[in-house]
Image: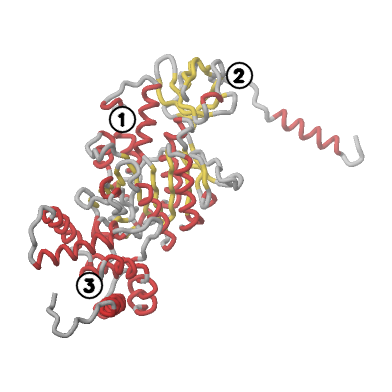
Amino acid sequence: MSADGTADRWLESARSAVENVRLGPKAEARGRVEEIADGIAFISGLPTVRLDELLRFDSGHTGFAQVLDRDRIGCVLLDGADAVAAGETVSGTGDVVRVPVGPQLLGRVVDPLGRPLGGKGEVAAHETLPVERPAPAIIERDLVKQPVQTGLLVVDTLFALGRGQRELIVGDRATGKTTIAVDTIINQKASDMISVYVALGQKSSSVKRAIDAIMGRGAPERTIVVVAGAADAPGLQWIAPFAGFTMAEYFRDRGQHALVVIDDLSKHAACHREIALLTRQSPGREAYPGDIFYVHARLLERAAKLSSARGGGSLTALPIAETDAGNLSAYIPTNLISITDGQIVLDAKLFNEGQKPAVDVGTSVSRVGGKTQARALRDAAASLRLDYAQFLELEMFTRFGGMPDAHIRDQLTRGARIRRILAQAQHAPLRLADELALVLAVQNGILDPLDMPQITAFRASLADMLDREAPAALASIQKDGTLDAAGRKAMLDALRRHAGALVGPAAAASDAGSTPAAPGAAPE
């Protein structure tokens, strides 16, 4: 024995370790990969595996059980197909697919499993949650009555969104669907909402543009970006929207407010169809499996405004879907329209004419609508949609010729200015006060004397003018979204002075450029 008793202490610890060992037979189910291709592995020898259970291969890679046949399992890999070989052994974990959650993900770009993609090191999350979670029960929900300000005048005035709502953004390829969603995320820089942007099956260049816009113009410290690229494994793409919802639900369940953008669910449906066909499930309509509606329904039902007993948090969903030649009656868009609380429809014709955002006000709708609008904006924009719809009809009929009367000319003038203010540059969301000022200006005829270039100048200098000349009205709007009669009058007076300052120089220049008529000359 050594002087300090080291050998005795080692012997005692060894004896304790041996005494605590439980000896006896241990059963462990092990399966074998029979066949693998295209991100799907067929496995035999695991009779106790459950649906959606996480499976682990000897190589360290993972997948989840998608099909349970009598003699084999269809496993969807979460890594590339070349990472697993036929003959490899596999075992069940007794758990489902989980993703890291928590504030450690904020400001990060990750894949659907929470693995970092932005070069900032590992995500030090302390908690994980399943990607598939039940939606809140009806008794746990509250009314959707708080606004989500998108900063887009055409949306906030005509198709207002609420916290806890599910609003579909749908349109043809390259019509600005992602831009609307990204601008909404950017506008949350001035709110308390946490944003989760899920890029699914998109080109790397498109994803990079969206990330640069969000991180450069928005609030990256309150944003999570989840990326499942077009070249990633089908299993990784399939779980991406579910992972995004789980990451957002962490904050919702703690009384905070979150926004999830899924870009886009058309590609998710194609991924689900691919997996179903590879695992030899029977196709249904348009080769989509019969459960595709249920897959998207159980995903989007997780968006909700929770009751005060559950903390009062909210989760708002903006799924995106792509149409072909404007066909809203296609299978997937029809499914999603029936699941969501409204849709923002983008029109390729409007986009090509330069009207951006190219929102079709005739087919777009929000089934929550004015209940969530700021009070001042709701009062000011009460007749805006009807006025604009009437203008579009009148414009179509007057194209056939004929001289309209003065009343019709006034309606056409007003409608043209409504269309002008609804157009908006990308990544330049407006404050609520700026939106209200533009609506008041157009509805009260303040913009009627201005031509189109002057309206552009009016809009460009509007924010600075309001900060300078209507600070009390701005403070009231920013505080609770209301504006009393005195504040409304002050804002209208400031708008009239602002418009008059633009009309004055133009009129003076026109007068200075005219040539005086010679004495006795006949008028033209």
Q: Which residue is mark 3?
A: 449
In the rendered image, residue 346, in percent from the top left (x then y), is placed at: 28, 47
The picture quadrant where one finds residue 480 is bottom left
Closer to the chain start, of discs 1 and 3, is 1
Disc 3 residue crowd, few under 14, some 14–19, many 20+, Cα 10 Å: some
Q: Which residue type carries mark 2?
A: Pro
Q: Which residue is mark 1?
A: 291
- Residue at coordinates 22% horizontally, 72% vertically from top-left? 449
Q: Quadrant of the N terminus?
A: top right
Q: Quadrant of the C terminus?
A: bottom left
Q: How is the image coloured?
A: secondary structure
In the rendered image, residue 435, in percent from the top left (x then y), is placed at: 31, 66
What SS does tag 1 mark?
loop
Q: Which label sits in the foreground, 2 or 3?
A: 3
- Residue at coordinates 28% horizontally, 55% vertically from top-left? 143
Q: Which residue is mark 2?
A: 25
Nearest the camera: 507 or 386? Answer: 507
In the rendered image, residue 425, in percent from the top left (x then y), is placed at: 36, 58
Closer to the chain start, of discs 1 and 2, is 2
Disc 1 residue crowd, few under 14, some 14–19, many 20+, Cα 10 Å: some
Q: Which residue type carries mark 3?
A: Pro
